[in-house]
């Protein structure tokens, strides 16, 4: 599948905006980039995300964005052109599900705030019942997760692109912070133990 992220994104009005800003020449040779099949880099990035943003378009033309989260790796890559996730019981508005029933186009933003990475994906969405594809349901299900799955979202890759890190503020999850400070906590515990032992020796020497 040839690279065509910009074929989708650069509509005539976008080209006009680029021309007004004097940057239209900047994007004329982007079609020389690699194809829109996931490589090992994209797969590794996707499989370590614990959340992403999912955009759909309503029948009235309004965009709608939802946050989806779970355990790291809940968004499963099936192959170089498809991926999927379990859709869990939520507030029961079903806005995204309804939008995709009328228009299967989606845009996803996958963020890595700690490393200031951002992957943008255009895809087509197919909503499946839990019993439609048992193997796929097994792949995306996590029995240890507290949520109750209601359906499966299977996405067919159309195009993707990486964003630059400019203006992405670094943030860290509680787990990332715990992992970072674990060596410091271990060292602190060691010093406290050594300090307590030294105090006991000093007390004995004073008797």
Image (cartoon, rainbow, N blue to C red):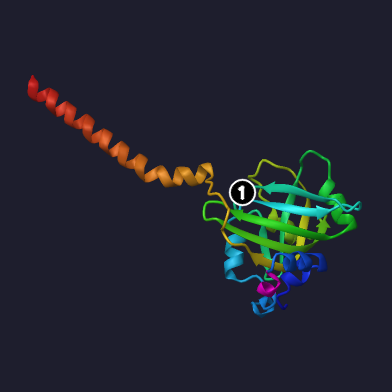
Q: Residue at x 74, y 56 (%)?
A: 137
Q: Residue at x 71, y 55 (%)?
A: 85
Work out which quarter of the rendered image holds the N terminus and state it.
Answer: bottom right
Query: Left or right of 35: which side holds 57?
Result: right
Would you say residue 130 is visible in this rendering? no
Q: Residue at x 61, y 58 (%)?
A: 118
Q: Residue at x 31, y 41 (%)?
A: 187
Q: Secondary structure at mark 1?
A: loop
Give the quarter of the image for residue 121: bottom right
**Circle 1 residue:** 71
Q: Nearer the viewer, residue 23 or 51?
A: 23
Q: Position of residue 125 (x, y in %)?
A: 80, 60
Work out which quarter of the rendered image holds the C terminus and state it.
Answer: top left
Q: Nearer the viewer, residue 146 or 117?
A: 117
Q: Is residue 13 above or below residue 127?
A: below
Give the quarter of the image for residue 2: bottom right
Magenta segment: 23-27
Query: Left or right of 176: which side holds 78?
Result: right
Residue 131 within the segment the image draws in magenta = no
Q: Is residue 184 above or below residue 79?
A: above
């Amino acid at each position: 599948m040839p690279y065509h992220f910009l074929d989708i994104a650069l509509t005539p009005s976008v080209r006009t905006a680029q021309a007004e800003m004097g940057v239209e020449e900047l994007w004329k040779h982007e079609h020389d980039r690699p194809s829109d099949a996931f490589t090992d880099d994209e797969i590794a990035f996707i499989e370590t995300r614990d959340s992403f943003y999912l955009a759909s378009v309503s029948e009235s033309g309004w965009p709608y964005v939802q946050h989806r989260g779970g355990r790291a790796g809940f968004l499963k890559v099936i192959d170089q052109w498809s991926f999927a996730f379990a859709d869990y019981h939520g507030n029961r508005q079903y806005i995204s599900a309804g939008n995709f029933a009328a228009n299967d186009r989606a845009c996803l933003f996958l963020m890595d705030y700690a490393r200031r990475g951002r992957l943008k994906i255009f895809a087509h969405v197919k909503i499946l019942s839990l019993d439609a594809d048992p193997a796929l349901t097994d792949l995306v299900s996590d029995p240890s997760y507290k949520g109750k799955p209601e359906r499966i979202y299977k996405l067919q890759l159309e195009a993707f692109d990486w964003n630059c890190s400019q203006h992405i503020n670094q943030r860290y999850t509680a787990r990332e912070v715990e992992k970072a400070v674990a060596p410091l906590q271990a060292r602190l515990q060691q010093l406290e133990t050594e300090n307590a032992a030294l105090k006991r020796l000093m007390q004995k020497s004073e008797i």
